[in-house]
Image (cartoon, grey):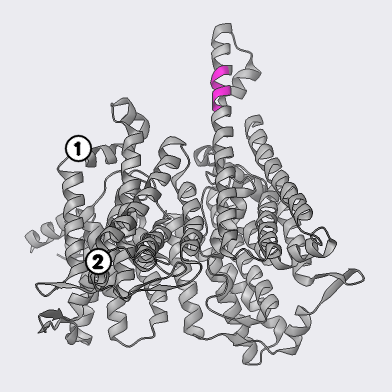
Amino acid sequence: MNQVKQKLKGFMQHKEAWAVIGILIVLLFNVFFSPKFFQISFNNGHLYGSIIDVLNRGSSLVIVSLGMCLVIATRGVDISVGSVSAVGAMVAVFLLKSAGMAAAPAILCGLLAGLACGVWNGFLVAKLNIQPMIATLILMTVGRGIAQIISGGQILTINSKAYAFLGRGYVFGIPFPTIIMILVTLGVWLLTRKTSLGTSIEAVGINETSARYAGISTTQILWIVYIICGLLAALSGMIESANVSSADGNNNGLLLELDAILAVVLGGTSMDGGKFYLAGTVIGALFIQTLTTTIYTFGVPAETIMVVKALVVIFVVLLSTDRVKNAFAKLTERKKAGVENAG
Amino acid sequence: MLAKLRIKNTALAAAVGIFAILFIAGSVMYPNFLSLRVLLNLLINNAYMIVLAGGVCFTILTGGIDLSIGAVVAMTSMIAASLLRSGMNAYLVIAICLLTGVVFGTVQGLLIQYFGLHPWIVTLAGMFFARGACYLISVEAIPIKNQAFYNISQFKLYLGPGRFISLNVIVALVFLALCLYLAKFTKFGRTTYALGGNRQSALLMGLPVARTKILVYTFSGFSATLSGLMFTLYTLSGYGLNANGAEMDAIAACVIGGVSLYGGIGSLFGPFIGVLVAGVIRTMVDFQGTLSSWWTKIFVGTLMLFCIVLQAVIVEREKARKADAQQKKRKKKEPAPAELAEAKS
């Protein structure tokens, strides 16, 4: 019993704990109320089921959240990801439709657009020393305008099968977005945990001045994280737009920045920068998607998702605050004391 | 202190200058632009935004933010429309709406202050909550047919033949005066600035930091519902997608008006000017006729960039000036007490 307690305590020490617990609670809820959630079937060489759906639909959020995680680790925030994802999708779809480009170069151009957005944000934050939230606020407002101007204010639809594969394709029965998600996660993990980049990012987030004195080129690091974030935002935007074979400058990636920030914070990374948790971020993003899918499977009106999301987020974040933790600690101590007294 | 004053004034002066230049440019470019009617319409169309920006400005001054305000505007319109549809007295509805905002804001403030949560996260959740609540009430738009409410909305103050301002404008101007008064002449206002300047010193000075931090969110929630009521009077319907992205417009207005998002710097007059600048740009795009409405976004964004860079440059220059002054003092070896105090501030 004590050993279990010790292990539990050890588990709770992990920053990722709350995201894991959140996902477990939602899954447990499904075990009791909708066992169908766990059914996985194999049709036409494709995997089907709610779990697969979570991994499929959640992949674009995971991809954005990973970029956001790195930015938040430097004590920044990129609130332009929603607009950047719209720009990336619009560039790719526009080139496919109007310029008659093939899918692969169009996607590459979409990524380049994301890269350009990242360079711009990085320039404002790293070179001009503007507070990240303000700096990215500019692109957040302007980005949608740019996307609209590219499309002439219309929703562009295309029927390129190659492009649609990005969002709807299957490889060995696994949804293609899920594969991209796994590859991106792996890539970001290798880049930050197997090179010194991760440590440098954390150093910048903890104390930029000391990081500079320690010989880290903080400008370069900041620039790199915003570029990665822009690239990943554009990629996720293209996945989303490929899924519906269209691009809508007004509604693509709407409120994406908020979901991404939530995923990162739920995953244990502090908004104050410093240590970042990639696994936690992935779990946090999947948690948000699991919650959404669960609500959908219950046939609850889709619009109520926001209320549930809000309450869950506040609940989870509250549990991780010191005040609540202390209150819990006191409660258990009192219980212990009570047991001893009785004994 | 002096440095701060200078930053505030330069940025605000720049905003006023931009407004003047834009208005003059509009008058030169388009006939009929230079008229009282355009100016009054500017106020009528943006009255709700003036209130919204003024409220959020207090949270920004403390170094926080309130992202829920746009959603609260929509929620207010939904609550008002649904209650009016059920036949409730219009004045009672207004009172209930304002109370909702006060409670909503206070809860957010409590979560931020008492549990030490990040304002971004709390107000983000608040935003989701308020938008979701709209759809819980109804997914579709609710028209308002209440006679008393309609009468309130039709109130006009004539300034001359055919030239009038609506009730919303009067409320917005009174609200602006209230904001200026709160910021300049009350303990609440001074504590707000102190909080944004340096929370630690504000605490050590014995200022009511905790209470003020909660109160700014209460005030922001109140102003958001007030703004929501004005928006409802303006459109005479409730809809969950109302004021989508209004929080960003309000924050942009603060930035253009010279309020620093770092907290502690800025005049309450700034958001007002910021809203008018954005309004003039929209009017010019309308007058142009051939430009589509999303050009407004690009112009406002570019202007925001200009203001932000200007702020950054001013801050850098002040830093350099201070460092210079300090160096001079070291050369003197025996600094005068007054100079020392200034260097410390």
Kindly check if marks 1 and 2 are in contact, taking CB atoms under 8 A apart as contact: no
Q: Position of residue B165 (x, y in %)?
A: 81, 69
Height in image: B334 above or below B91? Answer: above
Sequence order check: which comes first, mark 1 or mark 2? 2
B335 up-or-down from A19: above or below:
above
Q: Secondary structure at mark 2?
A: helix
Residue B151 placement (x, y as % from top left): 78, 83
Helix, strand or loop at mark 1: loop
User: Total label count?
Assistant: 2
The residue that disc 1 covers is A196
User: Which quarter of the picture shows residue B300?
Assistant: bottom right
Cα separation between marks 1 and 2:
27 Å
x then y, percent, for residue B44: 75, 67
Residue at 66 percent across and 53 percent down: it is B274
Residue at coordinates 25% horizontally, 70% vertically from top-left? A167
Q: Which residue is mark 2?
A: A59
Q: Quadrant of residue A91?
A: bottom left
Camera-side residue: B71 or B163? B163
Residue B323 sits inside the magenta stretch: yes
